Amino acid sequence: MMKALPQEIEHAFKERTYPGDNEIVQEATGDPGYEGNRLAIHFKGVNWQDLDLKTIISSGTLDPATFIYLLTPAGFAYYMPAFLLWSLDVDSAPGLAETLMFSLTPSVGKDSEDWEWKQEHMTIFNQQERDAIKHAYDYILPQLEEFPLVKN
């Protein structure tokens, strides 16, 4: 399954188009220290196939445990294949794989803090993309020993 998974992800997202520079990330005008503004520097104008997550995360300018939550629904969907492909090797994606799995795990209910975010960000995917996400999720999640949803 692992050999076919990267191709499935790439195929599923091949029709997803770049949403435009102003539709990638939530920015805060006038606040250069805001993480969303730093995120925009790395993501604007970059195709998901060319996104260099290793360099971005190792630069220390972005927190791999939080930056996903600063993406708009369109930005989250557009860069999802890059996040999935990089997270297939959990050891090369410290923090990102866990955050991605949490962002893809359904909320307990409407009262949970992340319910609205997940509703906005997850309903944008088509069926083919959802299938690829599910297959990647099923592959990645068991590799995360410390992930709270994994039962030992």
Image: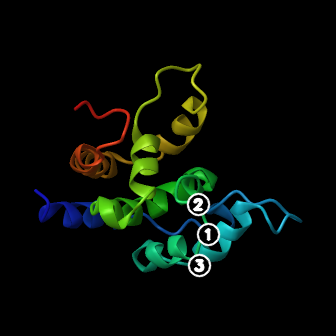
Q: Residue 5 carries which label?
A: none
At 60% from the left and 32% from the top, the residue drawn is 116
**How many residues crowd mark 1 within 10 Å: few (<14), some (14–19), many (20+)?**
few
Quarter placement of the C terminus: top left
Three-letter amino acid code at the position of disc 3: Gly
> SS of the residue at dot 1?
loop
Question: Rounded to the nearest whole Å, what is the CA distance between mark 1 and mark 3?
Answer: 8 Å
27 to the left or right of 89? right
* Position above or below: 63 against 146: below
Image disc number at residue 63: 2
Residue type beneath disc 1: Gly
- Asked which quadrant contains residue 36, the reply is bottom right
For residue 45, the mark is 3
Considering only order in the chain, which callout, 2 or 1, is on the residue closer to the N terminus? 1
Judge left or right: residue 147 versus residue 89. right
- Which of these two is toward me, 64 or 78? 64
Single out the mark in the foreground, 1 or 3: 3
Q: Which residue is drawn at 40% across and 36% down?
A: 105
79 is higher (above) or lower (below) than 123: below
Residue named by callout 1:
20
Foreground residue, 137 or 125?
A: 137
Q: Which of marks 1 and 3 is nearer the N terminus?
A: 1
Dot 2 or dot 3: first in sequence order is 3
